[in-house]
Each structure stands twice: as C-alpha cells, then as structure tokens.
Image: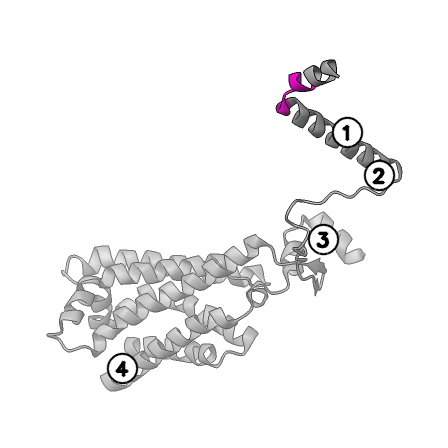
Amino acid sequence: MALLALSASLISPSRLACWRVKSTVKSSISAASFKLRNGSIKCKAVGDSSKPSIQPTVYKGAYGSWTVEPSDVREVILYRLGLVTAASAFVIAASDAFLPNDSLLGEVIKQNLDLLYTLGAGGLGLSLVLIHIYVTEIKRTLQALWALGVVGSFATYTILAKPADENLIHYVVDNPTAVWFVGPLFAALTGLVFKEGLCYGKLEAGILTFIIPAALLGHLTGLMDDGLKLALLGSWMALFVIFAGRKFTQPIKDDIGDKSVFMFNSLPEDEKSLGRET
C-alpha cells in the first residue's frame, strides 16, 4: 500500500492531464478511422454549419447561361457613378445661368467652370467605357464622339477661350459657332440617354434625347431667344438629375444585359462559327 501511495504521489496532475488528452485523441482517431472505413465521415467548416451557402442566380441568355459576378457589379456601379458625376457637374455649372450676377455662389461657380466641365466630361467618358451595348460598333462610335468632343473642347479652350481670358463655357455661350467643337461630346451623351430610354423605357431619358440637341442647335443657329434656351436648360438639368438618380433603382443585371452575348462576341471568329453551328 505504501508503494502504491508513493507511486501515486510521484505522478503529477499535469501528467494525468496529458494522459487524459492522449486517451481522448486516441479515441477520437479511432472513431474517425471507423467512420472513414464506413465512408460516413463529413468535413464541415467550424462555425459555418448554420450558414446556408448562397448560390448565384443563373440567367438564361441567347448563347447560354450566365451569372452576375463581383466584377460585373463593380462595372455597373462605376458606370452609374460616372453618370452621377456628369449630371452633378453639369447641374452645378448650368445653375450659374440662373443665379444673380452679384451672387457669392455664382462667383464660386464661375471660378470653377472649367473644372466642372472637366469632371463632367470625365464622368461621361467613364460611363461610355463601361456601358453595355450589344453592337460594338455603336459603342465605339459613342466613344469616338466623346474623344472628338474632348479634343475639340481642349483646343477651343487653349486656342480661343484662354487668350480671351474666358472660361470654356462662357466662351461657347458668347460664341455660338464654338458648338461645332464641343458638340460631339454632347452628341455622345445624347446617344447614351437614347440607349437608356430605348432599352428601359425611361421617360426622362427619352425626353433628354430631344432636349440636348434642341438646346445646342438652337444656340448654334440663333433661332431661339434666351428665354426658350433657359427653359430648355432648366429642363435638361432636372431630367439629368432624375435620370442619373433612377439608375440606382434598377437591378444590377439590367445594366449588364444578356451577358452571354458579350461572352460570345469576345470569342475568336473560329469559335463563333462553331457556336453558330451548334
């Protein structure tokens, strides 16, 4: 009995705990090996058992099934933010026409008209890069008009407006023929809102399709008085804000369109031929 007591006292609690852990591990391994032999073991991530996996919605397209990827979401959000930037810059700049000459806010806007014009053109350019149009040639045409308008605007500013100590917008207002140089930029905007109105039946986009060219042509030809031009400008401002804001009420998939068409168009010509045959 003394020997048993002595041996028990020599065994530390930590060793006892170690033996218990080993025993537990051995029993767990034995149970796991038994499950493996019987093909019943399942692997689960800790803490995820209560969270059901979210499967992306599969849409049927003209050339196959497709899903909305995170990259698609980013593109659509950037496309819409580009429109918001363009609309915000335009509305702030155009509000100068409705403010009193001695207004402090008007003076601040006048000093930053060139910056606002640049921001608006940049936002529109971003949207034209990311816009989803099935016919690639139409998209390239809108982008070419935008680029031509940017070049024309820059040339008008550096060659004509700056030497006259005017900002670009005021120079175009005072010299209607300058619309020829900046006009392609607004033609690209007109094409974009026409596409939106045609694809989604947006009333504000459809009206903008007529207001934008009407305002510019009326100023270019001199056939409109200032009152009518201001009325068109005010309508343009209001509709542009509504148009850009309502883009965020649409589902993401609407701005993507039929993704399978874009996937098909990106294929080499030989693979496209095989796809048409099948």
Label 3, on which residue?
A: 272
Asked which secondary structure carries label 1, the reply is: helix
Does the stretch in magenta take in 187?
no
Q: Residues within 10 Å of mark 2 (few under 14, many from 20)?
A: few
Indicate the amino acid at tag 2: Lys
* Residue hosting label 1: 26
Residue type at numbered disc 4: Leu
Check contact, mark 1 vs mark 4: CB within 8 A.
no
Q: Which mark is residue 249?
A: none
Q: CA distance from mark 2 to mark 4?
A: 80 Å
Q: Which residues are magenta?
A: 8-14
* Local secondary structure at mark 4: helix
Q: Amino acid at mark 3?
A: Lys
Disc on the earlier residue, 2 or 3: 2
Question: Any mark on residue 35, and which?
Answer: 2
Classify the position of the C terminus by image quarter: bottom right
